[in-house]
Amino acid sequence: MVRAERSAEMQTYEVAASAGNDRSARQRWAALAALAVAQFMVFLDETVVNVALPSIKGDRGFTQATLAWVVSAYIVVFGGLVLLGGRAADLFGRRRMFLIGTALFGAASLLDGLAHSQGMLLGARVLQGVGAALATPAALALVTALFPVQAERLKALSIWGALSGLGFAVGILLGGAITQAASRRWVFLINVPVAAASLVVVPRLVADSRIAGRRGFDLGCAVTVTAGMTTLVYMLVKAPDYGWGSPVTLTLLATAIGLLAAFTVIERGSAAPLIPAGFLHRPAALVPNVLQLLLGVSAITTLFLLTLYTQQVLGYTPLRAGVAQAGADYWTDVLPAMVILGLGTGLSFVSITTAALQRVDDAAAGLASGLLSASVQIGGALGVAVLAGVVAIWRSSDLLAAGSAPLVAQAGGLQLAFLHAAAVSLAAALVAAFALKRGEPGARAAAAAPAATRG
């Protein structure tokens, strides 16, 4: 009788434990969904604005030179701060930094949508960059903390990476559709309800996490690495305007190198380094970031070149640049590249993210996420500066000098830039094939996927 009662009690306990585990699992996957939607907003913003640039130019009276700052202001700030943002998430709380970053991003999007002057719009874009630099690495670090079991983490990171790639691809369509159907303001205002919902939902589903025992880092490390990264990204963005051999460009490059060298020296003697000793020397950290850099060069630049091609060469409206409602030129010249770009970018994000973060130490998850974000931003800035700002212009100038019509010359320049972007994709595939261990999750996909981003 006693044994039967104990057996019944044990069964009741196991059922209760199983139900509790089910609830916990459902909550973790719901938390992943909430975080993924919030970050989908950030990734979407990086492409949706590019398609809307012509409308922004006409609406706010930007010149061609000042219009570039609508994109550049965001890239420079995001790329300069994201490494620090990732480490701050590890030290001060990942949920806290995610919520702060998302709030800033949402508020800045509201200001962008309501902006009545160029200065207000550009200032809000800077604030958006700050918000993204805080929220992006914190969100990815929260995902790794939510799924400590390797198999579940791999699945979660795969979903995350796929949505990242989807955000870039959907931005092409959504940017044109919103601009054409409503106005350029809604390109920014669409972020506001998503950010507001994230601020309500995420705290209910996600607990905070941070490194136990540490509450800060060396101020000298933080200042030098942030200033160095910001200067480097700014140099890459503005080099095509100043000229690669101009005194301004060379001074900016020397300043960036000097600041990053000073960061390295300060780090070695610091009792609280920003980046743990030996972290970047591990292949598990170095190789995925190299691949992420190459992906930024290829995929982001190809997207930028496609926007130029559809709107400046084919003469599409923003909507026709974003959807398949055009003539034969679209179906033969644009659509295949867009499909391959979307598939390749999505697969690449999945494989690189899983390779970098599946086995990362929880104490450095924010740092690892920040490094990935910094790598793709630097890669994108470098690719646009070199391929769009040098290769395409050089080839177009040669064709014009040879007597080609202006549109033919511009198309020829873009074509050569596309081919260079494809070559970078192939180089990334070779790096993945030989540098990633075959047993690592994502290695096989990483070797195959970047080559699919050929423009």
Image: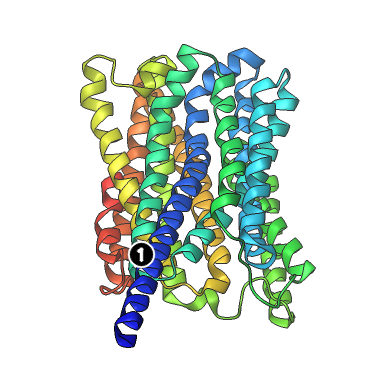
Taking the image as shown, residue 98 lies to the left or right of residue 144, namely right
Local secondary structure at mark 1: helix
Q: Callout 1 environment at 10 Å: few (<14), some (14 to 19), or many (20+)?
A: some
- 382 or 136, which is in the foreground? 136
Q: Is residue 121 above or below residue 277?
A: above
* Residue at 39% in and 45% down: 163
Where is residue 445? Give x, y as percent: 26, 59
Looking at the rendering, which quadrant does residue 102 occupy?
Answer: top right
Q: Is residue 190 above or below residue 43?
A: above
Where is residue 435? Give x, y as percent: 33, 71
Where is residue 214? Give x, y as percent: 71, 75
Q: Which residue type does callout 1 highlight?
A: Glu
Q: Is residue 388 above or below residue 382?
A: above
Looking at the rendering, which quadrant does residue 442 occupy?
Answer: bottom left
The residue that mark 1 highlights is 152
* Residue at 62% in and 13% down: 59
- 268 or 219, which is in the foreground? 219
Outermost residue to the right: 219
Outermost residue to the front: 1
Quadrant of the drawing holding the C terminus? top left
- 152 or 361, which is in the foreground? 152
